[in-house]
Image: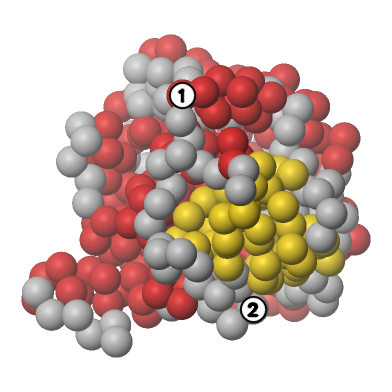
Amino acid sequence: MSTAEIDINSLPYADGDFFAFEQLLSAKEQDRLAEIRSFLAREVRPIAVDCWNRGEFPMELIPKLAEVDLVSPVRRQGHSNLFAGIVHAEVTRADTSIATFMGVHDGLFTGSIEALASPEQQEAWLPDIYALKKVGAFGLTEPLGGSDVAGGTRTTARRDGDRWILNGAKRWIGNATFSDWVVVYARDLADNQVKGFLVDATLPGFSAAKIENKISLRTVQNADITLDNVAVPDFFKLANANSFRDINKVLKVTRLAVAWQAVGQQLAAFDVARRYAVERHQFGRPLASFQLVQSQLVQILGNAVSSLGMMVRLSQLEDAGQARDEQSALAKAFTTARMRESVAIGRSLLGGNGIVTDFEMAKIFADAEAIYSYEGTHEVNTLVAGRAITGISAIV
């Protein structure tokens, strides 16, 4: 029952890109992807399990993430949405928690500023956000509101002269225990519309408490936020965030990003399962020499490749300005379902070693549960797609 380490790069299809989708990237983007992969292998993956076990975020990694320059690859750096998606999958492949940190800061938080702030606000805020000198969080979900928050936002905003007074609570807010700013969405008492505000985490009445005892994304510092008469200057009300329809402009793109995370999770499961199957010997030969084990590996790979193919096409539609909300919803629902199946197969393939984080698969297995639920549950995203193909809403 020995385990002999091998060089994973010596195996066929070492990158798991079975249909060579990465060849669709420009030569410049392929070089940049290689640079980012090298960074992830050097700085992220070696510390991922330890941080997850301790439930602590590696703050020392933030300046390194700033140096490798991952924030806003499409709008600021001019890369394709396909490149941005593959990079997000690769960060997830190295560590889902760090990918979620970036998804919150870059996708939800920065995306809100890029899509909904005025040019003057963007000029004032984005330089520090892009450089990770200011870390952001995104406050939409509430203790009593998840999938129904569009019509049931309980956090309120009241105009008071040249400021807004915010009251309420938010839950599951990633990065919020250490973020500098939080974009908070609140219902304006004057017109009952949901509006967005950039809230300084040091303002009186703002507090964030870490959510403990998680079994998924333990490195991510999710928080319960309380807003008790927090006074926000009018300049910090996002100029173009005046209804939930405006917020959906952000969520459509970030839902696509979470589907890319599901791809990265499957590739991570494939990496770990394949390496284990080749290195681990049972009955005097590698596990990979048994037919059922090869069948399991191919199932994981098939799930990953089918998910990747869907995401490649959706990213192309996004680049062409043709992607629709229901397409992002179907992608999130489909890829996360395949992901859940893949990580379960991978955990099973490792046997008892699949339930301890020493072999990585247990972390991959547990982290998949968060991806399955956030950015719209599987069920709600399924019904969004169902509404699109029937013309009938079954959500409420």
What whole-number distance in Å separates the C-alpha atoms at marks 1 and 2? 33 Å
Kindly identify which residue carries mark 1.
119
Residue in the image at 68% along x and 76% along y = 351
Residue in the image at 32% along x and 62% along y = 329
Compared to residue 6, the image places residue 82 above or below, namely above
Mark 1 packing: few (<14 Cα in 10 Å), some, or many (20+)?
Answer: few
Which quadrant does the C terminus fall into? bottom left
Q: Percent position (x, y) of residue 38?
A: 66, 26
The amino acid type found where label 1 is placed reads Pro
Q: Which quadrant of the figure has residue 186?
A: bottom right
Q: Secondary structure at mark 1?
A: helix
In this rendering, position of residue 133 left or right of residue 94: right
Which quadrant does the N terminus fall into? bottom right
199 or 230, which lies in front? 230
In this rendering, position of residue 307 left or right of residue 92: left
Kindly identify which residue carries mark 2.
143
Q: Percent position (x, y) of residue 13?
A: 46, 39
The amino acid type found where label 2 is placed reads Pro
Mark in front: 1 vs 2: 1
Residue 318 appears in the figure: yes
Q: Secondary structure at mark 2?
A: loop
Q: Residue furthest front?
A: 161
106 or 3, which lies in front? 106
